[in-house]
Each structure stands twice: as C-alpha cells, then as structure tokens.
Image (cartoon, helix red, strand yellow):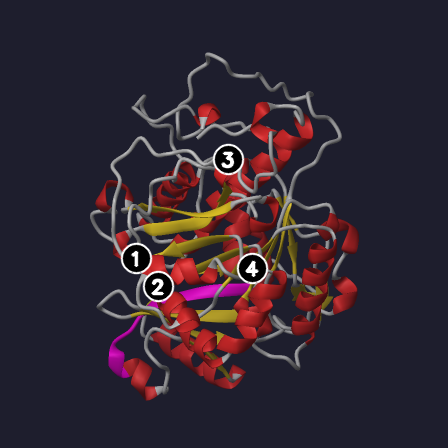
Amino acid sequence: MKFPGKRKTKHYFPVRDQGRIPFEENFVDGKKVYVVGIDQLLVDIEAHVEDSFLEKYNIPKGESVVLESDVVEEIYWKLKNENRIIGEFAGGAVGNTLHNYSILSDDRSVALGTICDTIRVGDYAFKYICSTSSKVDFSYLQPSDGHMGRAMCFLTPDKERTFAIGKGIMNNLTPEYIPEDVISGSSALLVTAFLLRDKEAPMYQATIKACEIALKNNVPVIFALGTSSLVEERRDEFWAFIDKYVTILAMNEQEALALTHIDDPLLASEKVLDICDLILLTVGKRGLYIASYVDEQNARKTDDMIHTKSISEYNLYEYSRAQKKIDCHQPMKIYSHINPYLGGPGEITNTNGAGDAALAALLHDIAANEYHRMTLPNSPKHNDKYLTYSSIHQISKYANRASYEVLKQNSPRLSHGLPQREESLEESYWEL
C-alpha cells in the first residue's frame, strides 16, 4: 500500500507509476505528521498454563483482571521455576500500536505514560525501550519511583488469552505531564478503556485532560475498548465517553457485544455509528469489519461482489473514503468486511497483538491523509473533508495483512515492515 511520506522500505500494495505525483524527501520540510498515544507502560509476560492454573488463582478465563503485586510476583516465579514462560515483551495495547505504526510508517509517534525514574541495564524499563521502535518518542514520559507494570498473558491449550495485571507505576501519569502543544499538533490521539478503569488514579484525569485538548483542537480521538467484562461493568459510562470524545472506536466482537448487547458485528457497528464516526471491529477467524460514514455525493460503489448479511448489500459503497458524520451534508453509513489474509497462518500460537496491528494500519492511513492534505491542499483527494486517505475497502486489506504478520509470529509487535507483494489485481491506491 503506497502512502505519501518518508519511507525506506517498499510498500505492500503495489501502485502504477502512471498519474502519480512524486514526493521527494525535501518536499515537505517543516511539515511534521505524528500520532500520540497514552498508555499504561507494561511488560507482557506470556506463559502456557492449564485451566486449573487459572482456577487456582481465581482468574476468569478470557478476561483481564488486576492482581495485587505480591500475587503477581508469586505467579511470576512459579511460572519461571516451572519453565512455563515463553516470552517477555514490551507490551500494552497503545504501546504495541504506536510501535507498529512507526514500523509501518517509518515515522514518529509519541508515547505518554510513566516509566521508572532510574533505569538500569537489563531491567524491565530498559528492555521496554530497547524493544520499541526508535521512531517512538519517549521524551514526554513521566518519571516515577517504583516498578513497571507487568501483564501476565496466560495461554491455555485452546489458544484463549487471559490477562492478569500487576499495576506497578502504570497509573501514575498526572495531568501536568499531558503536553497540550503535542496533542493539539498531532494527527490522532489514541487511548484505551483501561486508562479509565480506576477513577481515583492520576491516569484517569490525565486521560480526560488529553481528550479535552484533542476535542478542542479537532484532533481525532481513537478509543480501543479493553476487556469485555470491563466494558459490561462500565457500559453506560463508556457509551457517554464515546459520544462526547471519540471519533474512531476499535473493538473485538466480545467487546462489541458488551457495549451494544447486539450479537451481530454489522448491527453492532450500525448502532455504535450513532455516537462515533468510524469503527474497526475484529472478529477473530472471521476477519474484520470497518464501518463509517460518507457524504452521499462522495459515495463510490464497489467493483467487488455485493454481499447481504444482517444489512442488505452492506458493502455496496465500500470503495468510499471515510468521513466524519458532521462533515457530511447527506451522511450514509458504509461497511466493509474482509476474511483473514490467506485464511490466516497455518498455525497460530498466539493472537496477542493482532488487533493492535490492525489499528496501527488504520492510524497510518489517517496520518497519510493528514500529510497529503498539508502537502497538497488543492489535490482532488481533498475536494471534501475526509477522515481517511483511502477507501474503507483498502484499509481493511491493509489492516488484515498487518494482523496476519503478527499472528504468524510469537510476538505482539511487528519486527519489520510488511513485505512487498507481487503485482496483482489490486487497484492503484491513488485512484481510490
């Protein structure tokens, strides 16, 4: 997929040279495009366990729970002594997404959060920084006295993921460390439901302040839902939060069910579009959905097969670029669905991070649109206000492939850019 902007590696989706506008490295001197994310900086510790292990520690299977530090320490050393740990990675949903975004775009992202005020070679904070893309800017992190948070990811034989969190200093971010100029100048602000879990923690107020700044400066807020039990518990609160602040909502099918009480991805997306502008909904082995708005005058019909599910001919206008509802004179809801790339990897050892990779691809597209708008404001690409650079159909392909690259490895983060694909029947990105 070809985006404008600085790139060292070739893009996955091929483009034809005809009709393209060349971008030289010095063409946009001074025009900086980046995204910002707030995260509870964590180290992911992955281990194989049986269901009985979860039952012993009263950890609900498939959910995410917060445990006391001494319990996390006990579990860690038990797993370590029994050789059950398969990997220790820099983690956190936003941390994963920012890393993946910087890998895909080969450009800057900014992380906000807390980190140990003293970092030693070999400790968790050191490993976190070393295993994160150098394009992720840590300059604005808040130093804090204490240990980094740990997220135990338990993988049961059925491939289900269960999380137990040891908080450490992860919730210590204060509003004073939210830089208004950095957020106001960004292309998007990424936050998650986990940041709102504890209303008494400084992180909660810091997140609200950041969202207020983004709202005031018309910066899109991307909200990734956490675990379904948290969504169900705080459903009304999250619904109000999305309605007030959120432009783009990212979730999986369990979280969508908890939020909407609708057990159908298309109908759930249709309902949530009443309070935000774009939805990325991952559905595991059935791929992912993207739903958004487009002004009727900008709607483009698909050239692919038209499908009908719970919504008749739902993908009819999937070749359209996403817009905010407020920017549409006659808004239309549009949808696209894609099955897993190549049917998914032959063997999936871990699904951790696949949704974060899909979201990173969407972030890259949004940043590309901002870059192009700043660079060529008179381009036909900007005959109206658009949220994305490409059609939701093309974004689904990109997000799908990014997820595949994570699924085929035993790591929640991309380790390199996407490989170039041989010429195919894909449409030119510049013509959508």
Is residue 61 or residue 231 the one in the foreground?
Answer: 231
Circle 1 packing at 10 Å, graded few (<14), some (14-19), many (20+), is: some
Is residue 247 or residue 310 the one in the foreground?
Answer: 310
Q: Residue 253 — which label? A: 2
**Image location of residue 99, percent across then percent down:** 53, 48
Q: Nearer the viewer, mark 1 or mark 4?
A: 1
- The amino acid type, in three-letter code, at marker 4 is Gly
- The amino acid type, in three-letter code, at marker 2 is Glu
What whole-number distance in Å separates the C-alpha atoms at marks 1 and 4?
Answer: 35 Å
Residue tagged 4 = 122
What whole-number distance in Å separates the C-alpha atoms at marks 3 and 4?
Answer: 57 Å
- The amino acid type, in three-letter code, at marker 1 is Gly
Mark positioned earlier in the residue sequence (2 or 1): 2
In magenta segment, residue 23: no
Mark positioned earlier in the residue sequence (2 or 3): 2
Q: Are marks 2 and 3 in contact (CB under 8 Å)?
A: no
